């Protein structure tokens, strides 16, 4: 993964001081043993070139190791000559950058991060925002809590730097500022997940304001298109959160059309109409004193049904090799890990990214079906004394909608073993101890073993949170299992003390306001 010359070199004259606020080893020492503690170093080392530092000490071992283990220490090394940044940043970026994946999937704006980070100045808003996200991620992956404080400090330092950049205008640095704001939005989501809160989305609103304020010539570059698509995807994902209020969309919506017959892009364009539907529905129901009229409800119901019918065609047009395959081999550790299977359901996918695209499809449909369900229930209530109202047809429509929601929610539950396998805690990069289900023709790849312990929980917890809300008609057994898996993901990232809290409110008090 860490590939020598590709490990983001930076010119020395850009760096300045390389000491960070908190070196690992000065914190609470959450590692499970002295062997994995921050202070323990391996005497035999190899060197890997990275940006800003000619060498990083890396441990070697004669034992069989995964590619990630061969390149990374069991704990983050501590040395007065080693900038901690030069270990954390490559670790974060290489966790997703060089991992084999389906050619139709991407990492979104994160694909731009290595080059942008290498080109930015030391101490810039982009530099600090990258450090905030990277340190948080590595803290979650390793269980080393001392890195969390560093990530928070970098976030707080990035805010005034971003405000300062905005004051100078966005004529020449719009893309860099937009990437920074997207990173700050990512940090908001990470921080909210840690505390089991709802993300504030303040910086997502800022990203929308930046997209609205750009000139036509600022939206033509390939990197600008990638950043714009990232904003659109984040808005769509936000709209699928049933308990979240919608945010204003950019002036031009949807922002982009698919450049090629690409399954994720086609889904994004189709799903973008959910945002308009949510905004219209919230506008209709925002007046508590005046209930919506039957004609207005019927109009929204018609639009929601049309949207769901159009969106459902995506599944039939998805690449054939993307289709989920029921697992044929499920390790006992997966079955017993915190009740890791819901009703013995377990599907396998080509990779994490494909599974996540499928869950976005299911999540988007559930959000639309929830609007349909609410409309049907309102019509049933308002027509309780209307002799011309065909109650049986309406009741049948309600039951059909509930059945579809339950089926889609079960599909999401069926991805959990694929994403997190038998994992119940941070693995400190000993990824071989985690076991995963397999299907006929879909064995567990080394890339999956390497990446799923780091990213799997993050990829699935949001979808679990969205279907755990009341009103979808899911039975208590399923809701109890979903809440248990959400708590399990928090424990995987070392945040288990927070489990059991509702995802509501906001934990982020600081932000950069744009526009």
Image: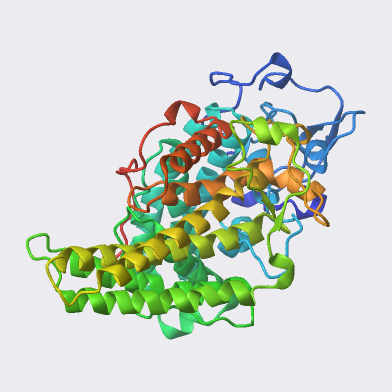
Q: Position of residue 506 (x, y in %)?
A: 32, 44
| Looking at the image, residue 439 lies above or below residue 211 | above
Q: Position of residue 81 (x, y in %)?
A: 69, 31
Residue closest to the eye, 115 or 227? 227
Q: Residue at x 79, y 33 (%)?
A: 58
Q: Residue at x 28, y 67 (%)?
A: 376
Give the color scheme: rainbow, by chain, secondary structure or one colour: rainbow
Figure quadrant of residue 108? bottom right
- The answer to whether one can see residue 387 in this image is yes
Figure quadrant of residue 231? bottom left
Q: Is residue 472 left or right of residue 101?
A: left
Q: Residue furthest left?
A: 289
Residue closest to the eye, 241 or 51? 241
Q: Residue at x 11, y 59 (%)?
A: 288
Figure quadrant of residue 507? top left
- The answer to whether one can see residue 86 in this image is no
Q: Is residue 218 left or right of residue 455?
A: left
Counting the numbered discs, the total is: 0
Q: Residue furthest right?
A: 62
Q: Is residue 233 left or right of residue 99?
A: left
Residue closest to the eye, 62 or 19? 62
Q: Position of residue 64 (x, y in %)?
A: 89, 33
If the image is split into quadrants, where does the C terminus sit?
bottom left
Q: Residue at x 56, y 39 (%)?
A: 135
Q: Residue furthest bottom?
A: 216
Q: Position of residue 405 (x, y in %)?
A: 45, 59
Q: Is residue 8 left or right of residue 365?
A: right
């Amino acid at each position: 993964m860490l590939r020598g010359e590709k490990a983001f070199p930076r010119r020395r004259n850009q760096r300045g001081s390389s000491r960070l606020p908190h070196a690992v080893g000065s914190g609470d020492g959450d590692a499970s043993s002295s062997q994995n503690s921050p202070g323990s170093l391996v005497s035999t080392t190899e060197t890997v070139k990275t940006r800003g530092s000619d060498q990083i000490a890396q441990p070697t071992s004669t034992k069989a190791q995964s590619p990630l283990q061969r390149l990374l220490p069991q704990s983050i090394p501590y040395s007065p000559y080693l900038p901690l940044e030069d270990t954390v940043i490559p670790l974060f970026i290489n966790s997703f950058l060089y991992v084999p994946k389906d050619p139709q999937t991407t990492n979104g704006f994160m694909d731009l991060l290595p080059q942008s980070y290498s080109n930015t100045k030391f101490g810039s808003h982009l530099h600090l925002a990258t450090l905030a996200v990277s340190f948080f991620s590595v803290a979650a992956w390793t269980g080393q809590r001392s890195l969390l404080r560093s990530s928070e400090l970098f976030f707080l330092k990035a805010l005034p730097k971003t405000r300062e950049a905005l004051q100078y205008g966005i004529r020449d640095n719009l893309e860099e500022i937009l990437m920074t704001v997207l990173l700050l939005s990512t940090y908001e989501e990470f921080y909210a997940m840690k505390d089991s809160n709802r993300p504030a989305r303040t910086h997502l609103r800022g990203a929308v304001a930046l997209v609205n304020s750009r000139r036509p010539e600022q939206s033509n570059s390939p990197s600008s298109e990638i950043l714009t698509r990232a904003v659109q995807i984040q808005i769509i994902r936000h709209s699928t959160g049933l308990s979240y209020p919608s945010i204003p969309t950019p002036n031009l919506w949807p922002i982009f059309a698919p450049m090629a017959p690409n399954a994720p892009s086609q889904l994004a364009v189709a799903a973008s109409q959910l945002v308009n539907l949510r905004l219209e529905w919230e506008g209709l129901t925002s007046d508590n004193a005046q209930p919506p009229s039957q004609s207005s409800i019927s109009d929204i119901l018609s639009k929601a049904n049309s949207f769901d019918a159009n969106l459902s065609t995506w599944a039939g047009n998805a690449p054939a090799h993307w289709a989920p395959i029921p697992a044929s081999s499920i390790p006992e550790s997966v079955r017993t890990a915190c009740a890791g299977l819901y009703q013995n359901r377990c599907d396998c996918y080509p990779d994490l990214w494909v599974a996540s695209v499928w869950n976005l499809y299911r999540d988007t449909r559930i959000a639309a079906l929830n609007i349909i369900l609410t409309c049907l229930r309102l019509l049933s209530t308002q027509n309780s004394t209307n002799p011309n109202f065909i109650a049986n047809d309406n009741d049948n429509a309600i039951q059909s909608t509930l059945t579809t929601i339950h089926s889609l929610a079960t599909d999401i539950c069926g991805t959990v073993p694929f994403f997190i396998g038998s994992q119940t805690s941070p693995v400190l990069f000993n990824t071989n101890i985690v076991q995963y289900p397999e299907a006929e023709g879909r064995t567990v790849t080394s890339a999956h073993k390497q990446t799923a312990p780091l990213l799997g929980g993050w990829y699935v917890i949001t979808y679990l949170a969205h279907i755990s809300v009341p009103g979808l008609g899911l039975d208590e057994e399923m809701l109890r299992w979903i809440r248990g898996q959400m708590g399990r993901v928090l424990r995987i990232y070392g945040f288990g003390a927070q489990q059991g809290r509702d995802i509501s409110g906001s934990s982020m008090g600081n932000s950069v306001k744009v526009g």
